Amino acid sequence: MSRRWLVAVAVALGGIALGSSAHGAVSLRGLHRIRHVVMIVQENRSFDSYFGTFPGTDGFPRRHGRVSVCVPDPAVGRCQRPYHDTHDVNGGGPHDRAAFATDVDHGRMDGFLRSAEDAVTGCAATDNPFCGGARHPDVMGYHDGRDIPNYWAYARNFVLQDHMFEAASSWSLPEHLFLVSGWSANCLVPLVTSSCQNSSDQFPQGYAEGEPATTYPWPAVHYDWTDLTYLLHRAHVSWRYYLDQGLQPDCPRGAMACPPRAQRVGVPGIWNPLPAFDTVHADGELGNVVAVNRLFTDARAGTLPAVSWVVPNNNDSEHPPATIKVGQSYVTRIVNALMRSPDWKSTAIFVTWDDWGGFYDHVRPPAADINGYGFRVPGLVISPYARTGYVDHQILTTDAYLKFIEDDFLGGQRLDPRTDGRPDPRPTVREDARILGNLLTDFDFTQRPRAPLLLPVRPHTDLTG
């Protein structure tokens, strides 16, 4: 008896509990009140760096009211405690798979300063003032409601997830691939799905060390496994990938700095992988990757697609050396537009950050499969049906976004090579991992739809510089 059949029966009967997991049975009742899912993905912040002092969370360990962790600083021969950082521009640290291992340090979670102080790759080619020890690393700094008041307001009024982990223990490209497909791989032969091999620390195809800032079209860059848009297209479910065009600064394999590259809707990039998926081309849906201004038009007109991704450019991303103020304002503009939309009463907004950016987090990532999980990152759920002031302690990754979408729009069909009609050699079906929580617990579909919480686009903050 297939999972898809069980989900279809559950929906037909009005919300029978769906399966079981490490978190118990979860009811589908009311799920289909959500007709629009919007995933807003920012850059390079750990959970502790934004919410480590938020009440009721698994924040910084404390003893007698004082933060009790202290991380060794090899440069000065003593340890450093987390501190409130009011700088609007941060540096962070390297955030590739090697840095992940150094930072975790076999579960001791004490390698963050060592990683940042050793990071010198590409420093001459950037304006990042913190790169390579030009300034004492700021990876132990954190922000709070004085600095990021809108993010804290969303957390107080909706749902904050304090065990949202990166999908893979690596950097931006794998995280964005997981976000659209539940996997990260290198494919040796274009258009040949069976040639794809697992890779969670891959160097982006079409890039070369030291080359000028250029972009490469498909199929020079090609991803040949199955992505979520393939299932959506087959089921006649609408989708769009809203891209903030401009530049994207993230570097191959998470180095501290590199020359920025153009980010355009039709060209594959680290933050824009869908134009490299052969399924998108075969389905004739490359035009669904659009400039972010289209989101505001769609929101005003009440024509949001069922599934949306919203991805920033370097200026709006919060990726060092971008400013926190600008990133928060960008997200607030988007959320306000969605709240003012005729579609608000049927919308779920998921906000997260793609990787930890080298910033400190005290929670050891749990074991999952060969690819992850990575560090904790902030996660917010904003919806008229979201619980109020709820802290979700479930173990989550962006795989839970795919799971929610599949349950809502696809009758529970997974990105599963055994059942999706397009076999690929992915090692696991991530959405069905027993460790993974279910976003349905963040909603109360019995409550009256909540009114919008419109916030100032440029709130007062304590950020300086």
Image (cartoon, rainbow, N blue to C red):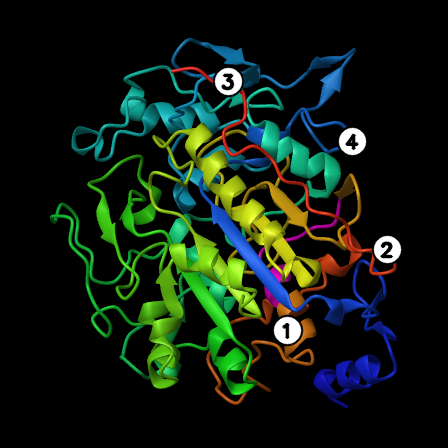
Q: Earlier in the sequence, mark 1 or mark 3?
A: 3
- Mark 1 or mark 2: name the one nearer the start of the chain: 1
Cα separation, mark 4 vs mark 2, equals 23 Å
The disc, 3 or 4, on the residue closer to the chain's N-terminal end is 4
> Which residue is tagged 4?
56
User: Circle 1 is placed at which residue position?
Assistant: 406
Q: How far is disc 3 from disc 4 in space, using C-alphas?
A: 27 Å
Task: Report the front residue among 462 and 83.
Answer: 462
**Which dot marks residue 275?**
none
Task: Tell whether 112 sits left or right of 221.
Answer: right
Say if 300 sits above or below 231 in the image: above
Residue 58 figure quarter: top right
Which residue is labeled 2 in the image?
Answer: 447
Q: Are marks 3 and 4 in contact (CB under 8 Å)?
A: no
Q: Is the residue marked by circle 2 packed among few (<14), some (14-19), or many (20+) residues within 10 Å?
A: few
Give the Cα distance between marks 1 and 2.
23 Å
